[in-house]
Image (cartoon, helix red, strand yellow):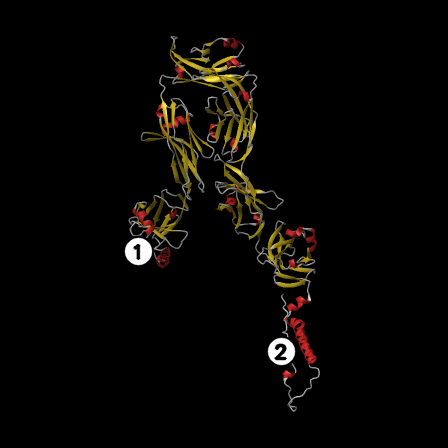
């Protein structure tokens, strides 16, 4: 049934309704409050319920939709009682079960659409056919549905990780969204074991952490953590990994949106790929690991080497640790905590050149001071387990080897770093070359390491090493640089470092360190020399902002309790995918301090400031609306005199850098808009008759602005004169000059020059009579003039306030040029033209003809064969006119 027909039925039944017994309940149809915002491809359920009907009667329901492109044509979707109800465009989806109605009770149902499409966007109607003998109440309800693209993305790099019990596990899930509405993202980490999905920990839409049942205690102890890094990264950390945690980990994200009834609804969700984690049980077995604080040390420095025991229940077990240099034992820390040092290291202990300590049950540290060249070489540690009673070791493990290089005090090696691209822009590429000199050393295998110090930081990092055996070893900045760096080594041992897709994270200082190596034995290499290059600085610039806002100042005049809409229009932006944050400012006058009203950030979150922050009435009065990508409106409801003043917006443009981090690319400030709030009861009236005047060029003229009526006798006036050129009637009105209420003149545009100020003057003849006086009128002064008068009155607080404004009538002025000639006057009048040019010419031709005739016939007697005739034939007097010259006509072109 059409909506208009349903409305008419209600109106026709109104007299009957008024006669019903008052005890009959009034029917009411209710839908959840809209608008509803849902994502394409998702499931939506819209509940419709009816009140005021008999509970025993099963109510039927009809669902329809109206699209914005054709608001007068409802399209029928589905009905509870009529299988022929759906229109063709929905019938297939209804028959396929994609659209169905779920009955909750006799008086309530839910409409389900399991696969939302963009064509489902519109205004939904739930209509309830009458089940009573009379009509009483409402029979339908409406709700708007907006369907937006599904932009949620969640990624986790699939891989296989092999861990040992007690290790730590770190996984990072990247979650992105580009929804134009304010939404929240919830992230949950799961462990999938066979057919079970075990929840590890969640970050809810309310930004709180909740661990799964099996992980609550471990979260309290700090062994299970979920951290949000930046805006898109969610890191899961599990310490003291257990054998039971072997399985597949994945990340599940849900995007939530809040409806008008404050309830949160699931907008969309995503699940990532799996990361397979294998956990090896140590049992009674153990491992020995080794690490050093530095592997390249200058003579005189210090070295710290840590031996780590990977084992279970180390508290109740007995281990001894020994350190070896070039396969010779130098220090041993026994299971009974007895320290043994060998060779010269025993003597160095006395001079405090060696120290050993047990940091934990799993970590043992050897520290060497005043390092010598002889301390360089291959280090490894050996761990032995024994019983409590000293009966000898029953198990022994050896760590891998690490090479420690002690720098020679002098070297002829020289290394130079240069770049031909010290500056580049975002997404650009720069390269740095490391040159080894002298050339006589270039035949030796070289290892080149790059160090990097980020801009605005005092910390430096090992970036990458191109080893003498051609292997590449990544350093501390692998995550930021890997995928952006290429390292190339030439035949002459020079190494080129190339960085692509540059951002501010790759800007900073670079240097290279070169080491020359020589084979000492078949399986042993010895470093012969090393040197460090100069520092090369690279600057990476963001793009130049192209942000432009409206720069035309304007004035808006409103009455008290009116609504004001102020535009912040973005005319140009740096890139199409730019996002903006907009801040609105207000000042009562240009000399007063500016106040921040509110800010809407790039995620459309509004923040109020100052007196607006804790004042609900102010926040309701001042609203900001993003009507399009490049237009933001400040809306002021129910204005009062305190709202008058100057408003402008400050826009910040944001872009994504190559690392998917938002940054500020530029700012711009709009022109001011003056808002004038007028009070009712203004009696200002300016003489408004239209006039036409003509004056000669170089003459002076005066235009009058006469105030006929005013609100108060002591009112003061501000008078502004406007002009529109006669040549272009569609041109905008130009403001010439203004005389404020204190009679101070202000000139605008081209009138600000001294010569124009002398030509144009404003005079106050009396309190209600003002004149515009113009000297030496020129043709360019021809056009239309009018004055605008603002009336200022004293308020009850004894302050001057703008009461109102009024415009005069239009004066059309024509300035005539002074170079008038006989030619121009003659062409202007047809009678004068013939009198001066045509008639004298005809008379002159006639006289020539008569003179020629008498010249050729001087003595001819005037005889006639008929002497008594009173008439003489005309041909005897004049020649044939066809033989004479024809008269010319002078043409005059205006």
Q: Would you place residue 344 above or below residue 869 in this image?
A: above
On the image, the x and y values in percent for residue 610 come to 55, 40
Instruction: Say which quarter of the image contains residue 207.
Output: top left
Q: Which residue is mark 1?
A: 133
Viewer-proximal residue, 588 or 21? 588
The label number, if any, that marks residue 881 in the structure image: 2
Query: Does any portion of residue 358 appear in the rendered image?
Result: no
On the image, the x and y values in percent for residue 636 come to 52, 48
On the image, the x and y values in percent for residue 108 come to 33, 46
Q: Quadrant of the C terminus?
A: bottom right
- Binning the other alpha carbons within 10 Å of mark 2 as few (below 14), some (14 to 19) or many (20 upward) gives few
Q: How many marks?
A: 2
Q: CA distance from mark 1 to mark 2?
A: 109 Å
Query: Sequence-wise, which precedes: disc 1 or disc 2?
Result: 1
- Binning the other alpha carbons within 10 Å of mark 1 as few (below 14), some (14 to 19) or many (20 upward) gives few
Viewer-proximal residue, 417 or 216? 417
Instruction: Say which quarter of the image contains residue 648.
Output: top right
Q: Would you place residue 135 above or below residue 255 in this image?
A: below
Query: Does any portion of residue 482 appear in the rendered image?
Result: yes
Left or right of residue 367, residue 394 in this image? left
Viewer-proximal residue, 314 or 697? 697
Q: Check whether the beta carbons of the residues at disc 1 and disc 2 lie within 8 A of each other.
A: no
Q: Quadrant of the N terminus?
A: bottom left
Left or right of residue 359, residue 797 in this image? right
On the image, the x and y values in percent for residue 520 come to 48, 15
Q: Nearer the viewer, mark 1 or mark 2?
A: 2
For numbered disc 2, what is the local secondary structure?
helix
For numbered disc 1, what is the local secondary structure?
loop
Viewer-proximal residue, 615 or 141? 141
Q: Would you place residue 649 above or below residue 70 in this image?
A: above
């Amino acid at each position: 049934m059409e909506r208009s027909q349903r409305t008419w039925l209600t109106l026709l039944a109104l007299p009957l309704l008024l006669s019903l017994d008052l005890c009959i309940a009034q029917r009411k149809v209710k839908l959840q409050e809209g608008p509803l915002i849902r994502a394409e491809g998702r499931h939506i359920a819209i509940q419709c319920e009816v009140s005021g009907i008999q509970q025993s009667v099963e109510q039927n329901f009809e669902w329809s939709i109206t699209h914005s492109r054709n608001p007068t044509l409802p399209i029928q979707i589905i009905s509870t009682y009529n299988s022929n109800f759906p229109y063709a465009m929905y019938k297939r989806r209804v028959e396929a079960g994609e659209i169905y109605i779920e009955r909750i009770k006799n008086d309530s149902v839910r409409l389900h659409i399991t696969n939302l499409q963009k064509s489902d966007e519109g205004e939904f109607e739930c209509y309830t056919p009458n089940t009573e003998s009379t009509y009483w109440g409402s029979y339908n309800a409406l709700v708007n549905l907006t369907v937006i693209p599904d932009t949620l993305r969640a990624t986790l790099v699939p891989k296989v990780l092999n861990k040992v019990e007690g290790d730590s596990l770190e996984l990072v899930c990247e979650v992105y969204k580009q929804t134009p509405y304010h939404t929240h993202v919830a992230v949950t980490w799961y462990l999938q074991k066979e057919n079970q999905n075990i929840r590890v920990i969640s970050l809810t839409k309310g930004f709180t952490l909740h661990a799964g049942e099996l992980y609550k205690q471990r979260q309290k102890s700090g062994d299970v953590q979920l951290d949000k890094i930046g805006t898109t990264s969610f890191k899961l950390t599990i310490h003291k990994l257990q054998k039971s945690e072997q399985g597949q980990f994945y990340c599940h994200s849900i995007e939530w949106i809040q409806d008008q009834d404050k309830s949160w609804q699931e907008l969309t969700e995503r699940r990532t790929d799996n990361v397979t984690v294998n956990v090896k049980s140590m049992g009674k077995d153990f491992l020995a690991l080794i690490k050093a604080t530095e592997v390249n040390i200058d003579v005189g420095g210090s070295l710290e080497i840590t031996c780590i025991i990977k084992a279970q229940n180390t508290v109740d077990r007995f281990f001894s640790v020994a350190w070896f240099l070039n396969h010779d034992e130098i220090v041993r820390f026994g299971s009974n905590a007895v320290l043994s040092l060998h060779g010269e290291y025993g003597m160095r202990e006395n001079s405090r050149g060696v120290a050993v300590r047990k940091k934990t049950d799993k970590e043992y540290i050897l520290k060497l001071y005043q390092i010598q060249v002889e301390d360089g070489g291959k280090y490894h540690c050996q761990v032995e387990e024994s019983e409590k009673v000293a009966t000898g070791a029953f198990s022994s493990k050896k760590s891998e080897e690490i090479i420690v290089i002690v720098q020679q005090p002098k070297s002829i090696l020289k290394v130079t770093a240069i770049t031909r691209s010290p500056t580049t822009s975002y997404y650009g590429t720069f390269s740095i070359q490391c040159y080894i000199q002298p050339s006589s050393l270039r035949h030796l295998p070289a290892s080149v390491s790059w160090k990097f110090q980020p801009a605005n930081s005092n910390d430096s990092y090992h970036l990458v090493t191109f080893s003498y055996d051609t292997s590449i070893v990544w350093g501390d900045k692998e995550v930021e640089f890997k995928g952006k760096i290429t390292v190339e080594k030439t035949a002459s041992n020079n190494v080129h470092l190339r960085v692509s897709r540059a951002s501010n994270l790759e800007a900073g200082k670079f240097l290279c360190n070169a080491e020359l190596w020589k084979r000492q034995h078949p399986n042993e290499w010895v470093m012969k020399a090393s040197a460090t290059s100069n520092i090369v600085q690279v600057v990476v610039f963001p793009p130049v902002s192209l942000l432009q806002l409206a720069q035309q100042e304007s004035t808006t005049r409103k009455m008290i309790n009116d609504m004001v809409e102020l535009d912040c229009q973005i005319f140009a932006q740096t890139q199409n995918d730019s996002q903006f944050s907009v801040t609105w400012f207000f000042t009562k006058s240009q000399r007063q301090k500016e106040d921040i009203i509110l800010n809407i950030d790039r995620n459309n979150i509004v923040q109020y400031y100052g007196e607006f922050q804790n004042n609900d009435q102010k926040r309701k009065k001042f609203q900001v609306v993003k009507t399009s990508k490049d237009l933001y409106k400040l809306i002021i409801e129910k204005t009062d005199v305190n709202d008058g003043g100057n408003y402008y917006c400050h826009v910040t443009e944001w872009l994504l850098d190559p690392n998917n981090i938002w940054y500020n690319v530029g700012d711009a400030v709009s022109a001011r808009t003056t808002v004038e709030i007028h009070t009712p009861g203004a009696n200002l009236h300016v003489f408004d008759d239209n006039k036409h005047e003509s004056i000669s060029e170089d003459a002076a003229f005066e235009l009058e602005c006469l105030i006929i009526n005013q609100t108060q006798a002591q009112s003061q006036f501000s008078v502004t004169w406007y002009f529109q050129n006669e040549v272009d009637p569609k041109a905008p009105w130009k403001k010439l000059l203004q005389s404020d209420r204190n009679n101070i003149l202000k000139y605008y545009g081209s009138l600000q020059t001294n010569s124009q100020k002398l030509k144009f003057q404003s005079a106050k003849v009396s309190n209600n009579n003002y004149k515009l006086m113009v000297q030496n009128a020129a043709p360019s002064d021809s056009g239309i003039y009018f004055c605008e008068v603002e009336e200022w009155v004293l308020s009850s607080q004894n302050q001057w306030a703008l009461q109102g404004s009024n415009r005069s009538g239009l004066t059309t002025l024509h300035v005539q040029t002074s170079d008038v000639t006989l030619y121009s006057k003659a062409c202007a009048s047809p009678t004068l033209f013939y009198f001066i040019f045509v008639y004298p010419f005809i008379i002159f031709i006639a006289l020539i003809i008569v003179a020629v005739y008498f010249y050729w016939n001087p003595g001819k007697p005037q005889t006639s064969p008929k002497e008594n005739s009173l008439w003489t034939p005309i041909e005897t007097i004049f020649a044939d006119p066809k033989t004479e010259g024809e008269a010319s006509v002078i043409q005059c072109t205006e």
